[in-house]
Amino acid sequence: MTRRKLSEEEVTLWRKVADTAERLHPGTSAHELPKPKPKPIKKPRPHLSPALPDFEVGSKANTSPSMHDLMGSVSERVARQPVQMDKKAFGRMKRGKLVPEGKIDLHGMTADQAHGALTGFIMRSHGEGKRVVLVITGKGKTKRDEGPIPTRRGVLKHQVPQWFALPPMKQCILQVAEAHIRHGGTGAYYVYLRRR
């Protein structure tokens, strides 16, 4: 928006008003027009997300499911957890060198069935003094996703790490890590239990 200039009539009217007014600062001229305020300096806004690539007409959009996944994959979230256990033992566990002392396979169960079975298994294993157990969730079925809201693949794969963080299992678990390929890879979790 540009400021318009005052007409001669408006300047004359201003001077009449200025002559009748009492000055707050006696050192200034009586007929001095008010100065416009300086334009504010625009500061660049910090970008909260990475810049999107330029779009060209006729180019194809990137429709990979990870593009709109703000939480990140389950594997990434589990891997970001700080190491609570002995680092050497954690490295051996991640490489599949620690043999699980027990395992539970949740394939074919509903979320309600799996939650009850998993809670009982973890509590029993902790009570028996076991240290490393294997929880097999599976990777989930692949299905076509044609809706506007992306759906996650593998309900149990996503739910199980959340269940581990809730009581009563939380008090028994020291560390959770994705299993080595020989024990199921991304479809299973190592659970390192606390000492009794």
Image (tube, rainbow, N blue to C red):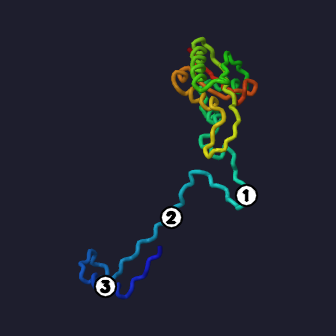
CA neighbours of label 2 inside 10 A, class few (<14), some (14 to 19), many (20+)? few
On screen, residue 76 above or below 48: above
Residue 58 on image: x %, y %: 73, 60
Residue 50 on image: x %, y %: 62, 52
**Dot 3 corresponds to which residue?**
13
Image depth: mark 2 or mark 1 in front = 1
First reached walking from the N terminus: tag 2 or tag 3: 3
Left/right of residue 61 with respect to residue 49 in the rendered view: right
Q: Amino acid at mark 3?
A: Leu
Please name whichever residue, 94 or 122, is drawn nearer the observer in this view of the structure. Answer: 122
Please name whichever residue, 76 or 137, is drawn nearer the observer in this view of the structure. Answer: 137
Q: Quadrant of residue 150?
A: top right
Camera sees residue 90: no
Camera sees residue 27: yes
Q: Quadrant of the C terminus?
A: top right
Q: Amino acid at mark 1?
A: Ser
**Dot 1 corresponds to which residue?**
59
| Element type where label 1 sits in the image | loop
Q: Amino acid at mark 2?
A: Lys
Q: Which residue lies at the image location 42% right of the left edge and 82% below the top edge? A: 5
| Element type where label 2 sits in the image | loop
CA neighbours of label 1 inside 10 A, class few (<14), some (14 to 19), many (20+)? few
Left/right of residue 99 with respect to residue 168 in the rendered view: right
On screen, residue 82 above or below 31: above
Give the label on residue 42, or none.
Answer: 2
Residue 65 on image: x %, y %: 67, 43
First reached walking from the N terminus: tag 1 or tag 3: 3
| Element type where label 3 sits in the image | helix
CA neighbours of label 3 inside 10 A, class few (<14), some (14 to 19), many (20+)? few
